[in-house]
Image: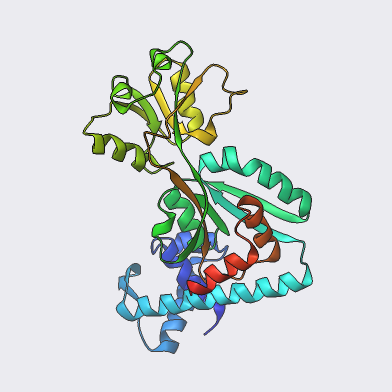
Amino acid sequence: MNLQQLRYLNEIVRRGLNISDAAAALYTSQPGISKQVKLLEEELGIEIFVRNGKRIIALTEPGKAILEIAQRILHESNNLKQVGQEFQAQDSGNLILAATHTQARYMLPPVVKQFIKRYPKVKLGLHQGNPTQIAEQVLNGEADVAIATETIMLYEGLVTLPCYDWYHCVVVPPKHPLLENKKLTLAKLAEYPLVTYDFAFSGRSKIDKAFANAGIEANIALTAMDADVIKTYVELGLGVGILADLAFIPERDRHLRKIEASHLFMPNTTHLALRKNEYLRGYTYDFIELFAPHLSQNVVEKAMHINL
């Protein structure tokens, strides 16, 4: 038994039981992977996969247990490498961030700028996706940190930490009738077609819940995955926008007007997620504290320990 065999096993499962895709991802041959998996099965004395001819169609019950152990071994193997790298080169390495569009576009730029200035030798990568995608990237070891508002708290394999609260606001073109209201109401909003986030993004569930609790049916005319698209369609006159307050920048969004809406919708909390049992490099702790100053290394370490 060796780590390479465990990597092959893990990658086959990650690629939907497709050996060809696993071989391509690991830059090796399909026959080579198949041979190593068979050797592993022979050594353990069990079948890891259910096969239909040469095709793998499922994991066996013992195969599921073996996969779980293999993933833990690979995870700890990676932690060993991280420990070595931490003491050999404390100011260099890689840090992969996974974030939703709103976080990547509006919250991360000043943090990334500070981080790069502090750690010029660290190669920084940024992946964008919906909350489910970025959570799975951290779980799979494809990213180190996930930042989002929705969903990521639901994954058992992640430690999630609250970063900051934010509210939704309403955006309209200049001279829109809603600007004449002293205090915006849900009933008034419902008189217009609305342009807002897709359900998986940026607190959309809080918007739906507010209308439902008030017994008012919202006219959702268009949904999008990021605030820039929402603002574009509002500028075109296709509806009234509801978006994250942090995504409205007056000096850039000069063709729009913002209306306060914190009294209409419940606050949202952006979370940062890390993989459980992960060994974090020193610069990762520094990045986290730059993004959320209350999340010091001590606080993060305690959270990781509690969630073991």
Q: Which residue lies furthest to the front in this view?
A: 182
Task: Return the x and y of residue 62 as percentages of the image width and height.
Answer: 34, 81
Tell me if residue 255 comes above or below residue 207 in the rendering.
above
- Name the residue located 52 percent from the left edge and 85 percent from the top edge: 1
Classify residue 96 by image quadrant: bottom right
Q: 136 or 20, which is in the foreground?
A: 136
Colouring convention used in this rendered image of the protein:
rainbow
Image coords of residue 68 (percent x, y): 42, 76
Against 96, residue 207 (above or below) is above
Query: Seen in the image, is 121 located left or right of residue 257?
Result: right
- Seen in the picture, residue 50 relative to 243 is either above or below; the reply is below
In percent of the image, x 50 and y 57: which residue is there?
A: 137
| Residue found at the very far top of the displayed protein | 175
What residue is drawn where x is 21% and y is 33%?
A: 215
Left/right placement of residue 19 relative to residue 93 reads left
Q: Where is residue 145, by image quadrant?
A: bottom right
Instruction: Answer yes or no: is residue 48 visible.
Output: no
Image coordinates of residue 88 in percent, x first then y, are 78, 72
**Whole-percent x, y for residue 78 in the image:** 60, 72
In the image: residue 30, left or right of residue 300? left
Q: Nearer the viewer, residue 206 or 143?
A: 206
